[in-house]
Amino acid sequence: MDRPEDRVKQLLSRYPQPVLLEQRRSVSAALVVAGLAWTISFLAATFIGLGNISPGTNATGLFAVGALSAAGGLLPIVLGVRDLRRPNKLMLTPTGFELSGARAETAYKWADVEKFRSHWNEDGNGSVLFDDVAPTRPRRRGADHDHELTTKYGLPPELLAELMRRWRRRAVADTPK
């Protein structure tokens, strides 16, 4: 398998042809599997517990807790299936980049964005932050960034930020003044 650094070089070599990056489907499939495992395990524990209570005992509380706990697995199932059906995509072009997926579709011009940088939160999840300097869009008050790419499209955050910076630099340099 190619090293991520080599993948960035390969993607940059395709400029000015559009490049499409997609969210890894394995992430979405893992969400579905985790949600199913969570739901099934809590349902099984609930019914085993219900089968072991003494006759005449009110089982409503046990059933309610088990059902609510099992329902907690439905969110990752729904999100995973949604992303499997319509995965997040990042399209790099000479004029800008487009984000599309189950949640929304957004396009940015290279001249309107800057300062792509990697970021790690306290949970150890990485993302790419960037600023939107378009005069037509309001800036977020008090934030150290305007937007965030939480999907890494198979690249570590540092390398995705590098890809975005280098693609932007080249595209802006090629833009007629």
Image (spheres, helix red, strand yellow):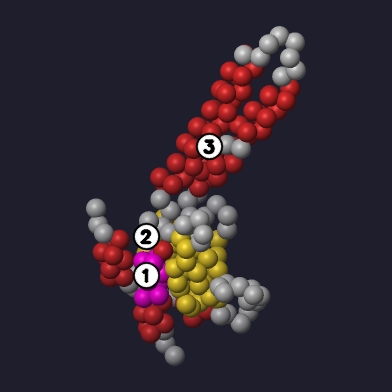
Front position among marks 1 and 3: 3
141 vs 148, left or right, is: right
Secondary structure beneath dot 2 equals: loop
Residue 78 higher or lower than 42, as above or below = below
Q: Can residue 30 be seen in this view?
A: yes
Secondary structure beneath dot 3 equals: helix
Residue, far bottom: 177
Secondary structure beneath dot 1 equals: helix
Where, quadrant-wise, is the C terminus in this rendering? bottom left
Please tell me the numbered disc located at residue 163: 1
**Residue 52, image x and y in percent?**
62, 14
Write down the residue under mark 3.
Answer: 35
Q: Is the magenta stretch mostly helix, strand or loop?
A: helix
Report the Cα–Cα distance between label 1 and label 2.
Answer: 10 Å
Write down the residue under mark 2.
Answer: 155
Rendered residue at 74%/22% (across/down): 60
Residue 48 higher or lower than 165, as above or below = above
90 vs 14, left or right, is: right
Which residues are drawn in magenta? 158-167
Front position in the image: 30 or 25:
30
Front position in the image: 126 or 147:
126
Are the two marked residues, 1 and 2, in contact with CB atoms closer than 8 angstroms? yes
**Residue 138, image x and y in percent?**
65, 76
State which quadrant residue 10 falls in. Answer: bottom left
Rendered residue at 50%/32% (across/down): 37
Residue 65 higher or lower than 102, as above or below = above
**Residue 81, image x and y in percent?**
52, 41
**Residue 53, image x and y in percent?**
66, 14
Among the two numbered marks 1 and 3 on one chain, the one whose residue lies closer to the N terminus: 3
